[in-house]
Image: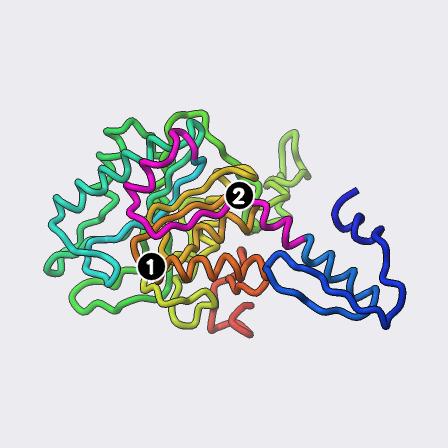
Amino acid sequence: MNKRQEMNASSPVNSVSDRATVQQPLGLDVEVVGEHERENLEIFFAEAEERRANDVVLNCQDNLDFLREQPKEKFKLIVTSPPYNIGKSYEVQSSLDDYLANQRQVIGECIRVLHPKGSICWQVGNYTDNGEIIPLDCLLFPIFREFGLKLRNRIIWHFGHGLHCRNRLSGRYETINWWTKRNDYTWHLDPIRVPSKYPGKRHFKGPRKGELSGNPKGKNPSDVWEFPNVKSNHPEKTVHPCQFPVELVERLVLSLTDENDDVFDPYVGVGSSVVAAIKHKRNGYGCDVVEEYIAIARERVDAFYAGTLKTRPMGKPVYDPTLPNGGH
């Protein structure tokens, strides 16, 4: 018998005039009237408690200190977007050599705590110097290779909005480099399939004539992903200037982990990676040195468990002004 069935089978309140207090997992007392209302609330709170079954750890702490406290081979997925060393409010800009030396330290510790079948997804953009762009993933590539990791995909994340450049083309993409320790890694394609371009297409000749030529569950999403970046009108927007969209991390969580696996973000910011993990029954871990960001991350986790967190749904089409209602 599941929790919903157990609640439906529980002893009812004897009369609609009977009053009872239901203690909910969020620490509030809710006064209810009547049997039906009580049972519905008990079911809701039981399901909320089920959602809280996964661990959440959000520390305001230096990531190297946090990592050194963790046992080896703990995390199935490490996903992050480190600072780009371009002088954002949350980072201290340094020389490029010092920046890469620090990244090498963090990457080395991440590999130590990475599960043998796990993945590291390092999302970066460009470092800029007097108008010259330097792709950070190109500079980080040899570091990951030195540690023996294998690059599975260089995913292009395309977004439609950003700064407009005067002396070069405006940047509208960043990269996610997906690395694994070995060839035997966790991988699930079905949960992240996207609708096929021609879903009813069939073989027109040969022994499979008349059969569907594509997978009925959809197609592989390829290595070019289009998600809106988190700007002022995005439902997930917080004070963080460079925020991960939750749906981007969700695609990695669903394809590279199993339920109850541990997901870690060493530059967690306002917690989008942790939200993506707990949305799909994974354990979420993260650290950041900015107290305000960790406080917001904790608020977002609480809002998720309370059912009030706003996120952009996976699979929602990107807004297209040429279509009715933007294609939504």
For mark 2, give the secondary structure: loop
Q: Which mark is residue 113?
A: none
Q: Where does label 2 land, which residue?
A: 282
Q: Is residue 219 visible?
A: no
Image quarter of residue 27: bottom right
- For image coordinates 20% across by 54% down, the residue present is 85
Q: Is residue 135 visible?
A: yes
**How much space separates mark 2 and mark 1, taking CA atoms?**
24 Å
Quarter of the C terminus within the rendering: bottom right
Quarter of the N terminus within the rendering: top right
Q: Nearer the viewer, mark 2 or mark 1?
A: 1
User: Is 62 inside the magenta-drawn segment?
Assistant: yes
- For image coordinates 49% across by 32% down, the residue present is 186
Image quarter of residue 128: bottom left
Q: Where does label 1 land, which residue?
A: 291
Task: Give the vertical position of 301 relative to 219 (above or below).
Answer: below
User: Counting residues from the N terminus, which is met first, the one under dot 2 or under dot 1?
Assistant: 2
- The kind of residue on which mark 1 rests is Glu
Task: Give the vertical position of 75 relative to 304 (above or below).
Answer: above
- For image coordinates 12% across by 44% down, the residue present is 97
Q: Nearer the viewer, residue 169 or 91?
A: 91
Task: Give the vertical position of 120 relative to 95 (above or below).
Answer: above
Return the x and y of residue 252 as percentages of the image width and height.
Answer: 46, 44
The residues colored magenta run 47-74
- The kind of residue on which mark 2 rests is Arg
Q: Nearer the viewer, residue 1 or 248?
A: 1
- For image coordinates 52% across by 59% down, the residue present is 302
Residue 215 is left or right of residue 76, and the answer is right
User: Is 269 inside the magenta-drawn segment?
Assistant: no
